[in-house]
Image: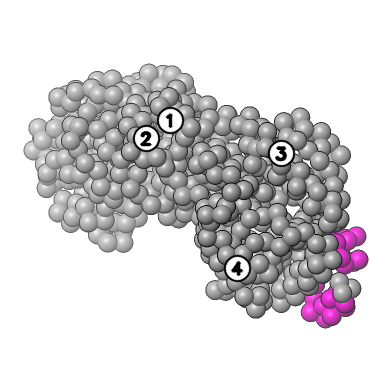
Amino acid sequence: MGDQQSTRAQQPARFDVARLTDLARTLRRDVLEMTTEAGSGHPSSSFSIVEVMSVLYFGGVLQYDPQNPHWPERDRFILSKGHAAPILYAVLAEAGYFPKSELMTLRKYGSPLEGHPNMRRLAGVEASTGSLGQGLSIGLGQALAARSAKRLYNVFVVTGDGELEEGQVWEAAMAAANLKAGNLIAIVDNNRFQQTAAVSHLTDTSLYPEKWRAFGWKTVEINGHDLNEVNQALAEATEYTEGPFAIIAHTIKGKGLHFMETDYTWHGRAVPKDQLAAALEEIG
Amino acid sequence: MTLGASVGLKMGKATRDAFGEALRALGVDHPDLFVVDGDVGNSTRTEWFAKDFPDRFYNVGIAESNLVSVASGIAATGKTVVAASFAAFLMCNAYDQIRMSVAFPHLNVKLVGSHAGISIGEDGPSQMGIEDVALACALPGMTVIVPSDEHQTRAAVRALMGHEGPAYLRVGRPAVPQIYDEHVSFEIGKAITLREGSDITLIADGIMVAAALEAAEQLAKDNIDARVLDMPTVKPIDIEALTAAARETGAIVVAEEHLHHGGLGSVVAMELARIQPCRMRFVDLKDTFATSGTAELLLEHYGLTGQDIVTAARELVGS
């Protein structure tokens, strides 16, 4: 992207597996500590996208500037599965949008770190989400605005796999292909569990790749916890400009904590204070 | 329709036509104006804008939820976006999207619902937006405008270009009488006194403004001196005009082509209950869906005529 003219203060770091592995660990610890402090939140839904978020923000993919959060040519990131707000906040703090100490104010009165992301209260949040199904449409709007303004930024939207049960996602998917939104990239966090059941109990997730392709999206499947695969898929997605691009990231809800990985009832629960030390130790 | 004929009002264009013309005209000087429609551009009249500004128009297909959130995304990049469809489908199908994607982030999306009210006639109740004003008013920070004729509609659309935040503009399908001329201005939140009076105040919006003027003329024959207020901005309502009306005339009839619950009548009653309680009557669509038929027959059948306003007024001030 020809951004020599921009006022961007810092270049996002290059892809580096060792550094990103360390960073992913830090981000998981942050999510764990902030949700335990809050006494609620969705750590397990956050853990499944830690690697995706790490590569996006710290692997040189997303173009952004925390010193100038409204830089018009920035790439946009939308967390459509807004309940995973803790990982978004941890990432934004790590990137320098606000001090890391503020993470401990999650969900508390007066804090801009609300239970779900609020774009009016926190720089770096590109859409207010929390009612599932809307993020891809909002991302499509931002992508179309880029095209009309002849700006070459990309829009990345992370949706949940359970979220794909919302009809609006498919309205957006169809429209994005019809409108050839080549700067729109959807990342489906296929973490296999929704609030009350395995997603596969309600929806045949094995059909997701076919569905996205049938809707006109170039689609790849990856292991969403493999940094190299994530990086490669995002590189391919940003290079592809003929239409929208979907990355189906196979992930594990609660990845990093054995007791969460196997138990979906952790969906909206924080780790209790008396289990925090052991959980942090497991993350390392 | 013969609405307004008894007081010499000339028939004008439909408010949706005026909206479409104003939008097209505004496209020239507003390069940041975008329009999103859900495949009803030939009904909402956004197709006129689309013809001149194809790069700033998106037909996202028959998908109102997506339509509203796409509008939100465009607005988030600093543009002003008009999102248009039938009032019924825009407000009812996409309500959660309006709430979360537009109202909550307080974005510059101007929602325009056409084919509002029962005066769309023959297409029937599934197509009639009769609860749209209530839904719009219920959302924090939403400005709600119901213009009464073509000239006021054009002025309102122009006013919305300088307005910050979300708004809902209600327009109708049939041709309606001209209340104003082309020089009329529009100030959001301001009532217009169309007729002075001291015995009672008739407050109306949309096509019921013409009916209120007819009613006032008829009441005058009985020596009842009726004030007529056109209240095109339902939210924020003109408190000053309301208070003066209640204080100076002591009785109010509110007339609107909308369900009884949650529309202009509710807003007027709620505000005056707090500030200046007075006796009131409401001419509106009672707790019912309408049916198919000509606009004129439907308005008569459901009690939305000048005569209905006269009857309500007489209940308050005698005869």
Asked if both marks, 1 and 2, belong to the same chain, the answer given is yes
Give the structural element (helix, strand or loop) at label 1.
loop
Identify the subunit bearing mark 2. B
Q: Which mark is residue A97?
A: 4
Asked if both marks, 3 and 2, belong to the same chain, the answer given is no
Q: Considering depth in this image, is A263 or A118 the residue closer to the camera?
A: A118
Q: Is residue B134 magenta?
A: no
User: Could you tell me if the residues under marks 1 and 2 are in contact, i.e. CB atoms within 8 Å?
Assistant: yes
Q: Which residue is mark 1?
A: B53
- Name the residue at 17% across, 44% down: B193
Q: Considering depth in this image, is A202 or B60 the residue closer to the camera?
A: B60
Amino acid at pointer 1: Phe
Asked if both marks, 2 and 4, belong to the same chain, the answer given is no
10 Å crowding of disc 4: few (<14), some (14-19), many (20+): some
Asked if both marks, 4 and 1, belong to the same chain, the answer given is no
User: Could you tell me if the residues under marks 3 and 2 are in contact, i.e. CB atoms within 8 Å?
Assistant: no
Q: Earlier in the sequence, mark 4 or mark 3?
A: 4
Q: CA distance from mark 1 to mark 3?
A: 28 Å
Q: CA distance from mark 4 to mark 1?
A: 38 Å
Q: Earlier in the sequence, mark 1 or mark 2?
A: 2
Q: Which residue is mark 3?
A: A240
